[in-house]
Image (tube, helix red, strand yellow):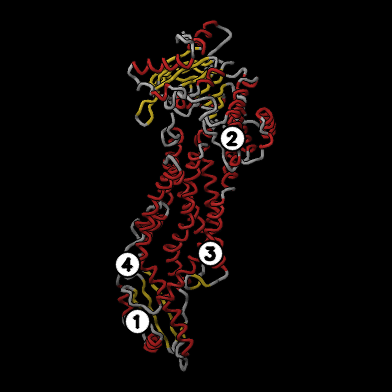
Amino acid sequence: MSGIAQLLDRGGQYRAVIEVVDVRRSLGGKPVLRGVGFLAVPGLITGLLGPNGAGKTTTLRLIATLLRPDSGSVRVCGLDTVANSREVRRSIGLLTEDPGLYDRLTCREQLVFAARSFGLSSAVARRRVEELAELLSFHDRLDSKAAVLSKGTRQKIALARALVHDPPVLLLDEPTASLDVSAAAAVHDLLTGSAFAHKTVLLSTHILTEVQLLCRNVVGITAGRVVVEGSVEDIARRHVTGEFRLAFLDALKDEALAGTMDPPSAALLGEGAFGHEGSA
Amino acid sequence: MTDTPAGIATILRRELMDIGRQRWVRISTLLQPLLFVPLFFGLPGLIAQRSATDLSHGSVVVAVQGGAEPVRQALESGGITIRETRDAAAAVLGRKADVGMVVSTTLRGKRAPELNVEVLLLGASGKSVLAFFRVQGVLNRATAVAERRREVNIHTTDLVRSPAGRRFFAASVLPVYVWFPLSVMLGFSVSTLASEKDGRTLESLLVLPYRPWQVIAAKWGVSMLAALTVAAVSLLPFAVVSVLDLPALGGRLSFGWAELSSLSIAMFAVAAFTVSAGLAVGAWGTSAREASSLSASIYIPAGVMSVIFLVVPDISPAPALLAVPVLGPMILAREGILGPLGIGAILSVLLPTIVYSTLLVEAARRLTSGERAILRPQT
């Protein structure tokens, strides 16, 4: 039984907000997801961990209604992402790996636009933007154009945009992949802070240490398939050394031996297998 | 809010802020038409001047009718060769010539011969455009010679001011005038979607709770605003030249408000097509570069065709301009292929409507399909 399933089994306290059930999806005729399924509950950060090309971003896009599953189903807050796509979008905030900011607009303009798009009045939107600027410490850059911002600040603005309508669900796609160590640490602090305490957070990453640091539950994915799921501690116990990294790589090797993917390369199995915290 | 047209206004406002800060948009919207206009007005005049001494072009038939000998002598002494004289008027009317110029003279007492000019415009090939300016050049030259020698009074009406000339310009020259500035806007409307892909902003836009038609409508709206600005900037000098009766196009323009209104409507229609096509192409390409290549694959051949029809005799411009749904039916109607002008006018409305709708629906479909073309491949 997976970690989440155990939590749900206790009843009452947890309720699955993201439900991904046996989802398959091909892109350009090539299968990218081959029966992915997992749950995510509020108040926890669920890590979607896997190497590049595993299908993490495609999974997030399916949850964010940007893609439709070929088969299987995705539900967010009890709503089907295909049948209720607009309602689902109101309840999620998506942080993409690339911040995707309009370079010629100021931070304030971008955030007010996002807030207004979610139906906030002009006054409320401006107040909310000020709050987020304080929370994420970029108040001094509010009136700067995005083009002149550092990567770290751009990522903060993108995170603020994902939070601007205070959604119950946050989808974070490699939020620290392009950040330096200090900027990544700032994002980590934020994710473990009170602002995220009651949110359902799905964190897609290939950085093992990030998962160990932040995630209560881990969904290991490779070659479009979930290969391991559970808490960091549960997964670590599966290896004789008790190391999470080695246990996770074992799961990848098992998948490779099962013939659904190429075996992990020597480089992949080395120290830099999934990169380090704060590395690209 | 996002359920209502106000949602479109929110996107539109953001789009306007974004494009208003792009230097190339400002240049192409305001400066490009202003640079194009002098070229448009000046080049034909140069052609007319340079061509004035060469009337050997096969289908420029100049017929001089009755009492024309003094005039013929005057023109020839000015270096102008007249290929056909006297009874050729009937031949002009009876053959499929591009431009026919019937010149007649009258002798009034002791005064020098008075020359009256009537221009017949037949057909619509590119050759007739050049011939038109050559004829204008001939008249200009003849007038100059006559004034110097004082042997003949030549009252030449600028061709573009004659009824036939006005029809000719409205049907053949003005569409080109409309099309060139607005072709710039194709690239712009392509970029409204394609640049979202390049800037990786499309995902964050599509995850907002808008309906696809609202996104498309806002982008169409902002592109149309820019296109119509180009149209207005292009029309302004044209209107000034026409209203103030300034020399242009090798002669003088004399268009009234009715013609200018028609031209404005034509510009709106062409802008609508351009913007719709640009959005569809922008949705199709995976990047701005690819979208630009796609649009170039449409418009470069059309441009080449346009050049060919201008240079090569006896080739109709219709094939090149048929690529434009608004102009195609107009040309076919004028050529008589579609029957009465009324049917052509109806088709001019119906065909573009079908094409615009198809293009916009396709853009919206691709915007929401989640196919490779919309979201960069990334797993």
Q: Amino acid at mark 2?
A: Arg
From the top left corner, tell me how far across and down residue B357 is, in percent: 44, 42
Q: Residue at x 62, y 29 (%)?
A: A164
Of residues B315 and A150, the one nearer the viewer is A150
Label of residue B313 in the image: 4
Residue A263: which quarter of the image?
top left
Q: Which residue is mark 3?
A: B238
Residue at mark 1 to residue at mark 2: CA–CA distance: 74 Å
Label of residue A154 in the image: 2
- The lab-note entry on whether marks 3 and 1 share a chain reads yes
Of residues A163 and B131, the one nearer the viewer is A163
What subunit carries mark 1?
B
Disc 4: CA contacts within 10 A as few (<14), some (14-19) or many (>=20): some
Name the front one of labels 1 and 2.
2
Q: Amino acid at mark 1?
A: Ile
Q: Is residue B47 above or below residue B199?
A: below
- What secondary structure is found at the residue carrying circle 3? helix
Q: Which residue is mark 1?
A: B82
Of residues B191 and B257, the one nearer the viewer is B191
Residue at mark 3 to residue at mark 4: CA–CA distance: 28 Å
- The lab-note entry on whether marks 1 and 2 share a chain reads no
